Image (tube, helix red, strand yellow):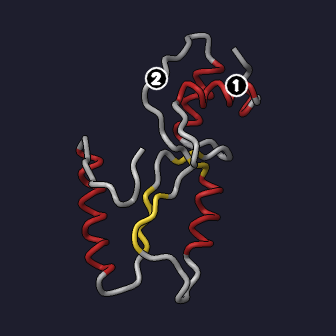
């Protein structure tokens, strides 16, 4: 886990692109009030987003699924993220500016996410 003040060390082309865009936004910050929000894996239940849909299809299939346990992510649900962004976007002198990690406090890997979805019957998924 790393914080807003830690050195950015992208490990793949997508991460390098994100870091490059963040650098460009940081240049804007010098001329305007800008808040850069870093997110992690964004989940949507209704309608199911790509990751949730993938997991639900696999849980409903007899083919099984392989999910990793060594890639913990601070996943956020899209509704929670949208509410936080709305709250943070209010104008005024007290509005936050700079760089902010905006994600769930709890790190979870996709295997645990699938088990939680199944345990809660999300999308008709049944616990295996």
Q: Residue at x 56, y 73 (%)?
A: 88
Residue position for label 1: 118
Find disc 2 in the rendering and name its residue: 68
Q: Nearer the viewer, mark 1 or mark 2?
A: 2
Taking depth in this image into account, of 21 and 4 the one nearest to the observer is 4
* Residue at image location 40% in from the left, 54% down from the top: 3
Q: Quadrant of the C terminus?
A: top right
Q: Quadrant of the N terminus?
A: top left
Q: In the image, 112: left or right of 30? A: right
Q: Position of residue 28 (x, y in %)?
A: 30, 79
80 sits left or right of 32 in the view:
right
101 or 118: nearer the eye? 101
Looking at the image, residue 62 lies above or below residue 110:
above
Residue at position x 30%, y 87% in the image: 31
Task: Tell me where residue 71 appears, x and y as whole percent.
Answer: 43, 31
Q: Residues within 10 Å of mark 1 (few under 14, many from 20)?
A: many
**In terms of sequence position, does the residue under pointer 1 or pointer 2 come before the other?**
2
Q: Secondary structure at mark 1?
A: helix
List x then y, in percent, for residue 94: 55, 84
């Amino acid at each position: 886990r790393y914080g807003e003040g830690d050195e950015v060390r992208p490990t793949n082309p997508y991460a390098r692109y994100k870091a490059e865009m963040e650098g460009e936004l940081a240049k804007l910050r010098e001329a305007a009030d800008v808040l850069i929000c870093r997110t992690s894996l964004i989940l949507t239940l209704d309608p199911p987003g790509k990751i949730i849909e993938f997991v639900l299809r696999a849980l409903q299939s007899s083919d099984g699924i392989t999910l990793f346990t060594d890639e913990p992510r601070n996943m956020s649900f899209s509704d929670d993220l949208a509410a936080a962004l709305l709250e943070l976007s209010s104008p005024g002198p007290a509005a936050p500016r700079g760089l902010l990690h905006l994600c769930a406090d709890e790190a979870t890997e996709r295997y645990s996410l699938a088990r939680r979805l199944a345990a809660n019957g999300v999308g008709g998924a049944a616990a295996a």
